[in-house]
């Protein structure tokens, strides 16, 4: 009888001794870095203010942050170079959004095709790899000669800059697909369409979204070059026009607007990434 009563007690004692051990995270981990990022931004602003206030760099070349904020208000109320701030921003946003839509619409299907088909990869890989490392200013004259000085040449320049990262990321997403998933789906009788929609596309989606985020950054960095083509509106035009008159505060205003816009676009893609591929980085 004592053996029977002691057995449950011993079992309960062993259960109490069991401890859950959480594996140590690797890399940056899952903790938020918002506080660190805000503190870094404030430190950079403080350093900027100190350098400008102490005169380490001449005031003509480096205005104080408060002077840049004042200039934003001036441009907002009075405009710049014959256009309001809203007209400059909307012109740049129109070019970026249209170019991004074209680059995404063409880059994702072609990238998936290159990952799935040997002939498509052989035909498309060489020209993409050839032109992608070229800076946009290198083929800017060709855009002007071939397409004129209208919106077509500006948007085409942005499309070329944004297309390659999206296409190559889609291809990389397909090629990184574990063959075990494909074989498992085939063994369960999946058709080619089901294999593509349920296995290939979801597996490539994280790489595709990363490519879109990179492409948007490239597009914003190319914007200044695109708006060199006989523009009268746009943030890039505003920056180049102000630099010719050494209006450094206006240049900083344009840089700040591009940075905020690019950050907003990147944050939107990150949000979409968290919604569409919540498993990324957790498997």
Image (cartoon, rainbow, N blue to C red):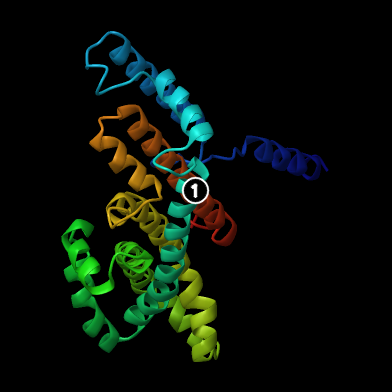
Secondary structure under tag 1 reads helix
**Which of the pair 114/93 is nearer the observer?**
93
Residue 36: image location, x then y, percent: 45, 27
According to the picture, the residue beneath numbered tag 1 turns out to be 87
Q: Spot the residue most to the right.
A: 1
184 relative position to 150: left or right:
right
Residue 63: image location, x then y, percent: 33, 20
Counting labels gives 1
Q: Quadrant of residue 207?
A: bottom left
Residue 136: image location, x then y, percent: 23, 59
When the figure is inspected, residue 180 is found, relative to residue 56, above or below; the finding is: below
Identify the residue at horizontal 30%, vertical 28% (top origin).
248
**Which of the pair 272/20 is nearer the observer?**
272
175 relative position to 42: left or right:
left
Q: Quadrant of residue 176?
A: bottom left
When the figure is inspected, residue 156 is found, relative to residue 219, above or below; the finding is: below
200 relative position to 236: left or right:
right
When the figure is inspected, residue 219 is found, relative to residue 109, above or below; the finding is: above
The answer to whether one can see residue 28 in this image is: no
**Which of the pair 128/275 is nearer the observer?**
128
**Which of the pair 198/250 is nearer the observer?**
250
Q: Spot the residue most to the front.
A: 82
The answer to whether one can see residue 232 in this image is: yes
Neighbor class of circle 1 (other Cα within 10 Å; few <14, some 14-19, many 20+) is some
């Amino acid at each position: 009888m004592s053996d029977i009563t002691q057995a449950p007690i011993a079992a309960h004692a062993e259960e109490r001794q069991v401890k859950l051990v959480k594996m140590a995270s690797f890399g940056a981990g899952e903790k938020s870095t918002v506080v660190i990022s805000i503190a870094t931004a404030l430190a950079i602003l403080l350093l900027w203010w100190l350098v400008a206030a102490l005169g380490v760099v001449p005031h003509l070349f480096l205005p104080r942050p408060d002077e840049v904020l004042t200039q934003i208000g001036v441009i907002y109320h009075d405009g710049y170079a014959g256009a309001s701030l809203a007209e400059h921003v909307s012109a740049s946003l129109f070019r970026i959004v249209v170019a991004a839509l074209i680059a995404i619409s063409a880059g994702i299907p072609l990238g998936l095709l290159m990952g799935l088909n040997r002939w498509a990869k052989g035909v498309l890989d060489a020209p993409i790899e050839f032109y992608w490392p070229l800076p946009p200013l290198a083929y800017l004259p060709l855009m002007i000669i071939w397409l004129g000085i209208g919106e077509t040449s500006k948007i085409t320049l942005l499309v070329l800059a944004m297309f390659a990262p999206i296409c190559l990321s889609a291809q990389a997403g397909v090629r990184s697909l574990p063959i075990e998933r494909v074989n498992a789906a085939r063994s369960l009788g999946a058709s080619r369409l089901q294999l593509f929609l349920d296995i290939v596309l979801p597996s490539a989606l994280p790489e595709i979204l990363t490519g879109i985020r990179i492409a948007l950054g490239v597009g914003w960095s190319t914007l200044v070059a695109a708006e060199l083509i006989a523009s009268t509106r746009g943030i890039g035009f505003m920056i180049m026009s102000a630099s010719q008159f050494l209006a450094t505060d206006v240049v900083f205003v344009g840089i700040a607007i591009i940075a905020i816009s690019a950050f907003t676009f990147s944050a939107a893609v990150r949000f979409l990434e968290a919604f569409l591929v919540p498993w990324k980085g957790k498997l």
